[in-house]
């Protein structure tokens, strides 16, 4: 599956071989865009253009200047253009505002920056959603199809993709002959979008491409001459020479230098930019080659891992047992029912994996020959092929936390309970089992509170929290109240409520001494435009805890999530620091004899004392919240949305020490906001937290931010977390969850209504540990059955015996939890893990990624056992289940 958007802008140099200025002075019917992306297909493209019988000129993407350079054409054709820069978009927008129109084909915009893709989607009214899992034919929508739709071109089968309309005036002109009839051709007044790669040899005949292009041209009142062959040497479109943009004139990519890449601060949510330097077509450095190789190898590994999980989940082969191994001995390939026969739903994925491996070898070969353009082309094509064929048609999820933040904006759009019904239906069908419901935002509760001075004015007249709890529970989901803690006011929210920008919110207006300021005395942080409570103020702490108690006791919420559980972002290096509230200054001065407003980072001892003082305010508040809430609601799940910065930097900049909260058992779930624009970026943020953290008393579910993230990358990021030792994932946010992702989630992780609800790790950790181990056994059995695992016979015998033993130990623990059984399971798992690497020595040489995934999943089971030991026995529950 792949989510793309489309667009471009053009200007070119004079073709020095043309020598016909009069021809250039005339308007050419069609401008055809050429770039490195369609260079390999250019011969097929030009052959089909000649057969179309239309005069055209060539637009060189590499030379872009301004709109005036497009004045010689009124219609642009963008066949299979995969990368567009921001300057291209600006030129295209300007040109289309003057009446320019476009025809596009294929997943155009494949390696554009997210903000470019987002704007192009709006400009063209549609985007490439995802590749078809198997070739298909076109068919008319109905009698309502646009008149220009051709009569021919429907009988051929080709490998295409789904084009998703993205504007109100977008019209589906043709669909694919598949279930649900996904759109194949979408048009607006200024664009026509073909859902296949046009002009690619071997994908379809010339006739189909020609017929459809001729029809699109007629839609724009351009009538090709039947039987006429266009010139084989078309001119360039520019009427005057346009100098090529030099590399130093283009926007510099920070990844092409040796300087560290800064992390952009979007509001106060850090988002790591894309990691791989795929946009610079110059020389590749050794570090870049290594990074690109690793990214492609890991993508191959994730697709293989997804495919194996899907095959195992949907297989009837069963568990890996000694009896099963013995039954396979002496069987023929046919008798053992090999997976190559059973895996036909993913035949195209298997082929794509083979081609991607060849592409990786070709990439390295081209690098060795210093042909960096060819190297990048091999790399991009291999990645595109895998993204197009990601396995997303069958169930593959295992018991995990699948959480999503339901944001205030989406809640406000609902005008009553009935408006939330469809939303919760969709989330349930998509397989989410935990909803973080935004309950308090900038001091405004979403419900009518008896503690807070004012309900959010945009939802007055009803109680969204009460409705959400009921709707979630009816659908087997948990509802956790997501609460802003120390962030007391938001200038962006003020604008929505028609309040003055400097309005401090209803609570700080009544209690101005509850606020903190920066060293310049400013209330609102300039970078985030938020004002904060003073965590050191006892009245603030009591007010916030009382508010949380109201939520936990008045409503049957399943959990509380602490957000903004920190100080504002700071940079002590430039004396941009916060925390100077009345109470904080008084307390620190009483302890040290110094007003913290007079303390600077150069005073290292005092500065560290000031930093430690603020860290302790947050730590002690979390401890107090945990004690007070759990004393009244022992079943309540406490979580915290936290930052994934390294501990030392995080404590200096935010005074957020969440490792301590987890170690002390104050919270159940740590939800790091590991937001990145590509999967490698997420990996760099999440892996250290999941593999290097020493705390074992909480579960960790990294966050994924959907904004500006292509659908296939979102799916790939979820798969990465499933391959790491994570207990699930959290998605931010409902407002960015589109229909295509809903469909994918429903297919891959949605639970059929006829099945029982899956156990959730933080509720039934021992049952989840068993089911996750059973899922591993199914994967191993698929490979053993199909003779796809390399292991010595002696090792196989021992491995299978220990697998059965561990299964029985985990099963007994899930059925009858007790301290002795927990210890027995922990010991059995530790023994199994210590031997696993030796058993998998040969397999690890052939498939290192998959063996590492299995080790990660064993580590996840260990964390579940440790978490269950703290939360379920003996005093927390009579039946061994934390509810």
Image (cartoon, rainbow, N blue to C red):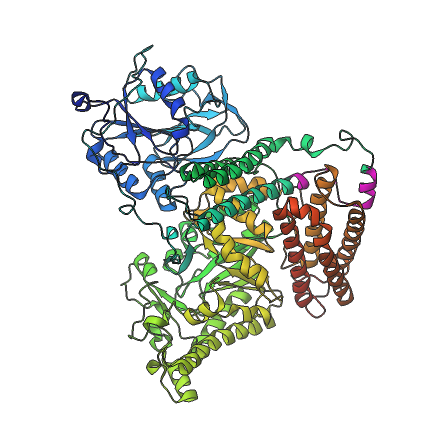
Residue 448 at x, y = what percent? 44, 63
> Is residue 171 something one can see in this rendering?
yes
Residue nearest the observer in this picture, 743 or 527 = 527
In the image, residue 685 sits, relative to residue 750, either above or below, namely below
In the image, residue 723 sits, relative to residue 875, either above or below, namely above
Q: Does residue 322 show up magenta in the picture?
A: yes
Residue 699 at x, y = what percent? 60, 61
Magenta-tinted stretch: 311-327
Count of numbered badges drawn on the protein: 0
For the point 55% across and 67% down, the residue is 553
> Is residue 704 something one can see in this rendering?
no
Residue 639 at x, y = what percent? 54, 63
Q: Does residue 376 show up magenta in the picture?
A: no
Q: Is residue 243 left or right of residue 474?
A: left
For the point 48% across and 22% down, the residue is 202
Q: Is residue 570 left or right of residue 841?
A: left
For the point 58% across and 34% down, the residue is 354
Looking at this view, name the residue that lies furthest to the front.
369
Residue nearest the observer in this picture, 838 or 594 = 838
Residue 600 at x, y = what percent? 35, 79
Q: Quadrant of the C terminus?
A: bottom right
Residue nearest the observer in this picture, 765 or 248 = 248
In the image, residue 626 sits, relative to residue 807, either above or below, namely below
Name which quarter of the figure residue 20 lies in: top left
């Amino acid at each position: 599956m792949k989510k793309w958007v489309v667009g471009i802008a053009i200007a070119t140099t004079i073709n020095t071989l043309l020598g016909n200025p009069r021809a250039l002075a005339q308007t050419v019917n069609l401008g055809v865009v050429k770039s490195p992306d369609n260079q390999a297909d250019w011969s097929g493209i030009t052959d089909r253009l000649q057969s179309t019988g239309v005069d055209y000129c060539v637009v060189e993407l590499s030379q872009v200047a301004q709109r005036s350079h497009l004045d010689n054409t009124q219609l642009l054709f963008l066949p299979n253009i995969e990368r567009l820069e921001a300057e291209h978009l600006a030129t295209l927008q300007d040109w289309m505002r003057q009446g320019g129109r476009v025809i596009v084909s294929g997943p155009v915009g494949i390696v554009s920056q997210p903000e470019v893709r987002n704007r192009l989607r709006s400009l063209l009214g549609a985007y490439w959603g995802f590749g078809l899992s198997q070739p298909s034919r076109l068919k008319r929508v109905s009698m309502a199809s646009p008149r220009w739709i051709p009569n021919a071109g429907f009988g051929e089968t080709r490998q295409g993709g789904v084009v998703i309309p993205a504007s109100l005036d977008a019209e589906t002109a043709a669909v694919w002959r598949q279930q649900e009839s996904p759109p194949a051709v979408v048009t607006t007044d200024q664009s026509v979008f073909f859902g296949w790669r046009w002009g690619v040899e071997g994908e379809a005949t010339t006739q189909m491409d020609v017929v459809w292009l001729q029809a699109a041209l007629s839609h724009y009142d351009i009538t090709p001459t039947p039987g006429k062959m266009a010139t084989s040497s078309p001119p360039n479109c520019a009427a005057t020479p346009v100098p090529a943009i030099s590399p130093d004139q283009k926007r510099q990519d920070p990844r092409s230098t040796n300087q560290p890449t800064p992390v952009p601060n979007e509001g106060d949510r850090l988002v790591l930019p894309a990691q791989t330097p795929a946009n610079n077509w110059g020389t590749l450095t050794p570090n870049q080659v290594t990074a690109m190789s690793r990214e492609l190898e890991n993508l191959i590994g994730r697709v293989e891992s997804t495919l194996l999980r899907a095959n195992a989940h949907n297989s009837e082969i069963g568990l890996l047992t000694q009896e099963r191994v013995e039954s396979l001995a002496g069987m023929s390939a046919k008798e053992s029912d090999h997976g190559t026969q059973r895996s036909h739903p993913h035949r195209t994925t298997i082929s794509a994996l083979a081609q991607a491996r060849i592409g990786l070898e070709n990439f390295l070969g081209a690098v060795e020959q210093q042909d960096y353009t060819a190297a990048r082309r091999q790399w991009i094509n291999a990645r595109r092929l895998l993204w197009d064929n990601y396995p997303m048609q069958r169930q593959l999820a295992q018991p995990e936390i699948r959480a999503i933040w339901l944001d205030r904006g989406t809640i406000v759009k609902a005008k009553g309970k009935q408006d939330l019904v469809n939303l919760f239906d969709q989330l349930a069908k998509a397989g989410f089992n935990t909803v973080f419901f935004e309950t308090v935002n900038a001091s405004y509760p979403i419900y009518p509170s008896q503690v807070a001075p004012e309900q959010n004015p945009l939802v007055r007249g009803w109680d969204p929290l009460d409705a959400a709890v009921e709707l979630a529970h009816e659908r087997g989901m948990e509802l956790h109240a997501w609460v802003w803690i120390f962030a007391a006011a938001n200038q962006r929210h003020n604008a929505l409520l028609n309040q003055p920008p400097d309005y401090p919110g209803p609570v700080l207006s009544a209690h101005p001494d509850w606020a903190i300021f920066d060293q310049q005395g400013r209330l609102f942080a300039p970078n985030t435009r938020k004002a904060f409570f003073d965590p050191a103020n006892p009245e603030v702490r009591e007010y916030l805890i009382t508010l949380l108690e109201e939520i936990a006791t008045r409503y049957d919420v399943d959990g509380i999530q602490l957000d903004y559980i920190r100080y504002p972002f700071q940079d002590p290096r430039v004396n941009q620091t916060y925390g100077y509230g009345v109470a904080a200054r008084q307390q620190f001065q009483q302890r040290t004899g110094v007003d913290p407003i007079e303390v600077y980072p150069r005073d290292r001892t005092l500065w560290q004392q000031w930093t430690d003082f603020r860290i302790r305010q947050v730590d002690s508040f979390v401890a107090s919240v945990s004690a007070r809430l759990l004393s009244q609601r022992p079943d309540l799940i406490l979580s915290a949305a936290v930052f994934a910065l390294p501990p030392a930097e995080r404590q200096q900049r935010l005074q957020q020490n969440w490792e301590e909260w987890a170690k002390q058992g104050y919270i159940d779930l740590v939800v790091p906001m590991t937001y990145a624009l590509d999967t490698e970026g997420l990996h760099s943020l999440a892996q250290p937290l999941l593999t290097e953290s020493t705390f074992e008393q909480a579960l960790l579910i990294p966050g994924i931010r959907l904004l500006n993230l292509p659908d296939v990358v979102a799916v790939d990021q979820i798969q990465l977390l499933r391959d790491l030792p994570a207990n699930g994932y959290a998605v931010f946010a409902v407002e960015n969850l589109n229909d295509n992702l809903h469909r994918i989630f429903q297919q891959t992780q949605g639970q059929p209504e006829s099945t029982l609800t899956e156990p959730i790790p933080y509720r039934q950790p021992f049952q989840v540990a068993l089911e996750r181990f059973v899922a591993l056994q199914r994967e191993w059995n698929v490979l053993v059955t199909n003779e796809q695992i390399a292991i010595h016979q002696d090792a196989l015998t021992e491995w299978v015996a220990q697998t059965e033993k561990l299964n029985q130990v985990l099963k007994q623990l899930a059925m009858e939890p007790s301290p002795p059984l927990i210890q027995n399971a922990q010991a059995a798992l530790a023994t199994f893990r210590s031997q696993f690497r030796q058993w998998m020595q040969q397999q690890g040489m052939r498939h290192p990624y998959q063996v590492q995934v299995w080790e990660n999943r064993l580590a996840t089971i260990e964390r579940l056992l440790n978490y269950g030991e703290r939360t379920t026995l003996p005093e927390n529950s009579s039946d061994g289940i934390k509810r």
